[in-house]
Image (spheres, helix red, strand yellow):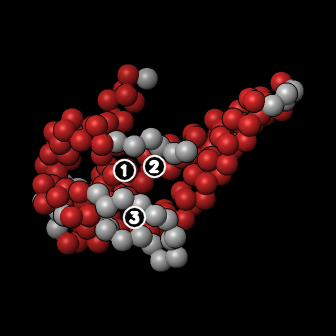
Amino acid sequence: MAKLSTKWPVAGVLSGLVILVSGTMPVGAQVARRVTPIERSALREELGLTEDQVKSIKEIRARNWQSMRETVRALREARRALREMVLADTDEASFATKAAEVRDLSGQVLEARARTLQEVARVLTPEQRDKLRTLRPMRRHRSAPLAG
């Protein structure tokens, strides 16, 4: 487990890179979102990303966007239902089933993000990955929850 915990800070930064490097949402996405520093080219410049790298990251993000979005939406709905069950007089079996669904969907989201980040990491040079590791502590306060 200790091995996983050392990789997740980098995964968080790479996740931000995947989501934000493109500066645009995939066609058809109707999601309101904040403008982030990467969209103003800050992280692109700090890492020294080439246009080919930016294009590759955009393609990775676009390829994975729809399924990730659907899974996150299902997770959000399952969490909402579980919260309602907590406040209602719900039987233990129903509650346990819904909790298991939330755990399963959370795991799916985490795995999908990790796999996407793994693809993005392959696009970066070893020097860029090292630079990203040094930037991570400065960006830690900006991280957002995984879903929900």
Residue 82 higher or lower than 60, as above or below: above
State left or right for residue 52 relative to residue 105: left
In the picture, residue 136 is in which quadrant? top left
Q: Residues within 10 Å of mark 2 (few under 14, many from 20)?
A: many
Structural distance between the alpha carbons of marks 1 and 3 = 11 Å
Identify the residue at image location x=65%, y=51%.
74
Position of the C terminus, as image quadrant, is top right
Mark seen at residue 15: 1
Residue indicated by mark 3: 60
Mark seen at residue 113: 2
- Residue situated furthest front in the rendering: 87
Q: In x, y percent, where is residue 47?
A: 15, 55
Q: In x, y percent, where is residue 113?
A: 45, 49
Position of the N terminus, as image quadrant, is top left
Residue 48 higher or lower than 140, as above or below: below
State left or right for residue 102 relative to residue 137: right
Contact check, label 1 and label 3, Cβ < 8 Å: no
Identify the residue at image location x=41%, y=70%.
25
Q: Earlier in the sequence, mark 1 or mark 3?
A: 1
Contact check, label 2 and label 1, Cβ < 8 Å: yes
77 and 2: which is toward the camera: 77
Identify the residue at image location x=41%, y=60%.
33
Give the residue type that dot 2 points to.
Arg
Structural distance between the alpha carbons of marks 2 and 1 = 7 Å
